Image (cartoon, rainbow, N blue to C red):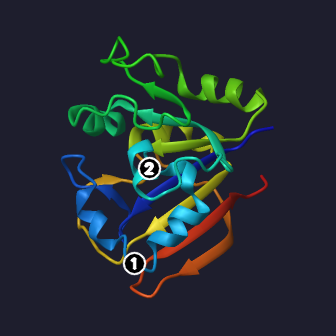
Amino acid sequence: MRKLTYFVGTTIDGFIAAPDGDPGFLFPYVTEDYLPHLVGEYPDTLPTPGRAALGVADVPNSRFDTVLMGRGTYAPGLADGLANPYAHLRQIVFSRSLTVSPDPAVEVTTEDPVTLVRKLKQEDGLGIWLCGGADLAGQLLPEIDELIVKQYPVVAGSGIPLFHADFSPRSFQLTDSRIFERGNVVLTYAKAAE
């Protein structure tokens, strides 16, 4: 069965974006010692233009073949003219307000996220990447099999949290950790057996 992985960048205090949804304040923390790790280990998660710029456009997908996004995660790229941000992946955007896809390669759906993810998990293929955002992650929390948290050495104070969900503790087990020279940390967690 395919697994759902929430691969996401966050501050020390658990925010994935500024209050207005902009994650740009995290970008300066993608440092020279850290970028090669991201490119080498997670090339599937790079936007298609980034893959080309970093010389991995022709690298076959190794971890993921599907990406899930909420409309808020998809919107910034769309505003910049990038309607097909992950052309190397099957792209699914969950939205109640965006009714027509701006690109034929991007599927827009109003389907219940949990129901759709359960269907996707039954299909053959590589993993499913939950790109964000907080509302979608909160809805899909029961289906998340793995968390890969890229924690940056900054405290934001407020913003968009990792999860927007009702109080419902879920256990995960730390399976890997990597610390980088400038303080970035990549933590990998597997869903704990219930």
Single out the residue that lies furthest toward the left.
Answer: 20
- Location of residue 153 in the rendering, given as x and y in whole percent from the top left corner: 35, 78
- Location of residue 78 in the rendering, given as x and y in whole percent from the top left corner: 28, 32
Residue 52: mark in rendering: 2
Q: Is residue 184 above or below residue 82?
A: below
Single out the residue that lies furthest toward the top.
Answer: 100
- Location of residue 25 in the rendering, given as x and y in whole percent from the top left corner: 23, 63
Apparent side of residue 131 relative to residue 41 in the rendered image (left or right): left
Residue at left 65%, top 59%? Answer: 171
Single out the residue that lies furthest toward the bottom.
Answer: 181
Residue at left 54%, top 27%? Answer: 113
- How many numbered marks does the figure carry? 2
Q: Categorize mark 1 by other alpha carbons within 10 Å: few (<14), some (14-19), many (20+).
A: few
Residue 32: mark in rendering: 1
- Location of residue 170 in the rendering, given as x and y in whole percent from the top left corner: 62, 54
Residue 153: mark in rendering: none
Q: Taking the image as drawn, is residue 190 in sight?
A: yes
**Cα distance, mark 1 to mark 2?**
18 Å
Q: Amino acid at mark 1?
A: Glu
Q: Nearer the viewer, mark 1 or mark 2?
A: 2
Residue at left 58%, top 47%? Answer: 58
Helix, strand or loop at mark 2: helix
Q: Earlier in the sequence, mark 1 or mark 2?
A: 1
Task: Check contact, mark 1 vs mark 2: CB within 8 A.
Answer: no
